[in-house]
Image (cartoon, rainbow, N blue to C red):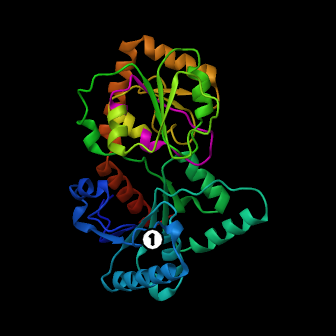
Amino acid sequence: MTEDTGRAIVLTIGPAHDGPWWWEQLRRSPLRHSLIYERVSLGGKTHHQMSLWDSARLTWRFLKLLVRARRERIRYIFTFESDVSCYLIGILQLVPLLSGPRHVILQFISREKGAGLGAGIRDAIARACLRSVHLIVCSSRNEAEYYRRRFGWPQSKVAFAPFHTDQRFLREHSDAAASDYIIAAGRSYRDYATMAAAVAGTGLRTLIVCGRGGPGVSDLPSEVEVIRELPLAELIERMARARIIVLPLEHRRISTGQTVLLQAMALGRPVIATRTAGTEDYLEDGENGVLTPPGDATALRTAILDLWHDEARAATLARAARRAVSRRHLPLHYAHQIARLLASSEMPRA
């Protein structure tokens, strides 16, 4: 099986810059010769802030991109998550004259389906827009299966590839001395209520780093200090010095939390996380971290206290976590995994 994907356009949306953090690391991979990076700017806006005029301009840009891709025999176009580029490219490629390059969505995520007629209509629209997509890649096995069932997609259309993190975290802060605090970070689907209940009465200093809206918990114990909107560099510095990093998550069929989880693992800190879709494919309980049941403050408290008082075990888990990242969760690994999935998707099926 070859890992040569042919020429491919990697498409992102946002303010103009030379590329996201992973681009230079990816360009040093054996696949770099085939990748063309395209950044479409919305003038500082996010895709959620687009006007009708912005949508028209973006559609025109994508139309020209697809014409060029067909002319230059580009084999793949990669888009990310579920932003507007995924849907516009999908719709445009329903036109036969624009359907040359295969469209692949990486790190696909969609909010869980709600109840009611509106949710069904939204899913029907998504299903129609993404009908032309060649492959949808998710960051969790369970999440991939959830989307297959929800949208009625065939097995061949949805795949799992482990997420990745910045390889610089493996060497930066490697000599940071641990301080006497626990830290939890992130915004999406965090279960800070369970976290607060777990540390209440322990006397362990606990930092919760969250978004502007706060942790969503009104009554916090004295052990907890909330920090809002911390810049990434400062967050990494705090994580690198934490005695334990905790990732408390709501139980969801979609996956969240991998960014913070892999950062923590790469920094060589012991990690405790909720066992759910976003963590099961990354942490092996008792091997490179600790997994606790969703919403179980007692189990989380026990896990925290066990690691707090057993520094040798905490260090063993942390070393194993760092090894796991260096072997499986870097941009180079992700690129090769995507190439293998594409090679497999091109093979004739019985």
In which image quadrant can residue 191 be found?
Answer: top right
Rendered position, 295 above or below 116: above
In which image quadrant can residue 117 be found?
Answer: bottom right
Rendered position, 19 above or below 58: above
The structure residue drawn at horizontal position 40% and vertical position 25%, both measured from the top left corner, is 270
Magenta span includes 1: no
Q: Residue 223's spot in the image, x, y percent? A: 52, 21
Q: Toward the viewer: 206 or 2?
A: 206
Q: Toward the viewer: 272 or 55?
A: 55
Q: Residue 325's spot in the image, x, y percent? A: 34, 38
Residue at the spot of label 1? 103
Rendered position, 252 above or below 241: below
Residue 116 showing in the rendered view: yes
Image quadrant occupied by the N terminus: bottom left
Q: Which residues are magenta?
A: 239-260
Q: Residue 129's spot in the image, x, y percent? A: 58, 74
Q: Identify the element where label 1 is drawn.
A: strand
Q: Amino acid at mark 1?
A: His
Q: Toward the viewer: 4 or 251?
A: 251
Mark 1 neighbour density, 10 Å: few (under 14) some (14–19) many (20 or more): many
Residue 293 showing in the rendered view: no
The structure residue drawn at horizontal position 72% and vertical position 56%, both measured from the top left corner, is 114
